[in-house]
Amino acid sequence: MTAQTLDARPRPRLLPEFRMTGKAFRTLVRTQAKLLCREPAVVLSGVALPLALIVVFGLIPSFSKPAASLGGKTTLDVYVPTFAMLSSVLTALTALPVTFADLRERGVLRRLAVSPVPAAGLLAAQVTVIATAAASTALLVALIGTLGCGAALPVNIGLMLASYLLGTTALLSLGLLIAARAASAGVATGFGVPAMIVNFFFAGVYVPLQQLPHLLRTVSGFVPYGAIVDTWSGSGAAWQHLLVLAGYTVAGSLAAARFFKWE
Amino acid sequence: MPAIEVSHLRKSYHGTTAVADVSFDVADGEIFGIVGSNGAGKTTTVECISGLRTPDGGRVRVLGLDPQHDREALRRVLGVQLQESQMPARIKVREALELYASFYPDPADVDTLLEQWGLADKAKARFGKLSGGQKQRLAIALAMVGNPRVVVLDELTTGLDPHARRTAWELVEKVREAGVTVLLVTHFMAEAERLCDRLAVIDRGRVAALDTPAALAGLGPASAQRIRFRPSQPVDVAELAALPEVSAVEQRGAQLAVSGDADVIGAVTAYLARRQIIAAELRVEQTSLDDAFIALTSHSTKGDVG
């Protein structure tokens, strides 16, 4: 090597680049939305499943009767928020990472890497699509549950909405982190599904939270789905939970954009 | 200013040298070829030029831009067709073109591109349903969608049937007619000979030769004249091989292949005439770019890469 040889390493950036035109972003969102609609697995698990569950629960007469063990609430009352959140959990932790890993495995991301699209823009467009689908599903579940089947409205709608929104962004950020790195759809599933099971566990889907030891209940407040459910229960430390969820959102999405791998 | 400048490019992966020392300049409006065996370092070189990889050393400039520091500016003027890169299986041809068109400040018209690259009747077809040739045409159309000034085509015709390959060659010539500089990576000599103004032969991460295809063909071994024929009677192979103009004789069934220097044809025909032997199915092979390529890179089969 001669003396004039330069080392061409770029200086690492602290924040990811995000410069793209509105037109490019809109086209990306539209295209990714169309592609998502053409994936039957995503549509079935992320949209159809939560809707089917709330309809089935709404049709079981005993679930609409107040139960002393639930503090006077009906089974339906308890499950409306859980099912409303289900689409976010499923799409954020499975559909989102698997979609990206699959694009990476096929070299689609490699091709995008030589176009003027920044990684952050690509992630943001996909999140927009997934979040819209999840939020629409949640809204439908809530409407069917309350207006359709007569479940009680939440006491504090503002807190409910805030925890739903921050909870969804927290889960999406976790999904994004897997999406940013997973080399194949198999790897993405390998990380996404256990993350989902952990979230379900700490949200009391398998065992009611009240039956968990104190330590696990404390941990539950630091797992996104657990923090969300505890906020809804009305007995939890709502502001602490919202802070935890905001922390996941900011740290997860920045790390995802920063450590994004095109191939 | 050259369209592409590469000087002393170097890149290793985990201790294995992919590119040891590669330098070349591509003039504006040129079709420049990079040829080499599999694993010679062609794709790594192209990936450094496209900004997909960070070189370990050396200097790369595309239209004066540094692919590492001026990524955004580079991506607006550089079109790339990558080896083994796909579209999502469920995206439609028109959607893919419209998507990529939206990324660029001054894109080409999608309908014109569909027409130009013979994809108009496939506009609504999903990528997964396209044939190899159609996918390749879409890949070039996508490389052209941003109205680039330089395009990189990596292994454009690998996996195409001979007919589709010829069509692809015409497409590359169309790209150049549009005033675009083309960097073409290939391992087909016939393709390099037909399309390239100049080419670099890359071997074990270094430039083994760089010239026009005609000049490179002349670099082949001086004794590369070869004649093949079927003798009407058995020939004494040892006697034929003993002729001063002959360097090698090979018997393949009823056929003889005789290699030698520039005078080998005269010597062999005189020898045959003396013995009243008729040479049927006589063919004379000139040195070609293929021979030059083999001569330039043959040592790499002994293999001491890394």
Image (tube, coloured by chain):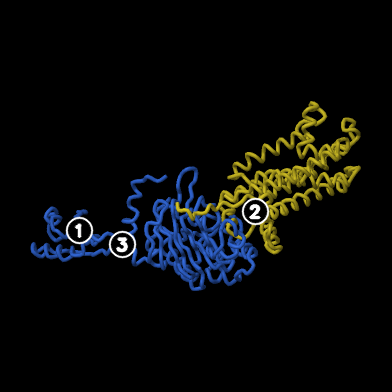
Chain colours: A yellow, B blue
Going from the N terminus, do you reach mark 1 or mark 3 first? 3
Q: Is residue A52 visible?
A: yes
Residue at the location (31% across, 62% down)? B219
Vertical position of residue B126 compared to residue B118: above or below: above
Count residues near mark 1 (Cα–Cα under 10 Å), then give few for <14, some for 14-19, many for 20+: many
Q: Are marks 3 and 2 in contact (CB under 8 Å)?
A: no
Task: From the image, tell me which residue sits under label 1.
Answer: B258
Judging depth in this view, the residue of B111 and A182 nearest the camera is A182
Left or right of residue B39, residue A213 in this image: right
Question: What numbered label is drawn on residue B219?
Answer: 3
Give the mark toward the camera: 1 or 3: 3
| Secondary structure category for the residue under label 3 | loop
In the image shown, does B164 or B53 lie closer to the viewer? B53
The reply, left or right, for residue A145 in relation to residue A250 is right
Callouts 2 and 1 close, C-beta under 8 Å: no
Instruction: Name the kind of residue labelled 2 in the image.
Output: Ala
- Mark 2 crowdedness (10 Å alpha carbons): few <14, some 14-19, many ≥20: many
Measure the alpha-carbon separation of dots 1 and 3.
20 Å
User: Which residue shows up at 58% across the image and 62% down it?
Assistant: B74
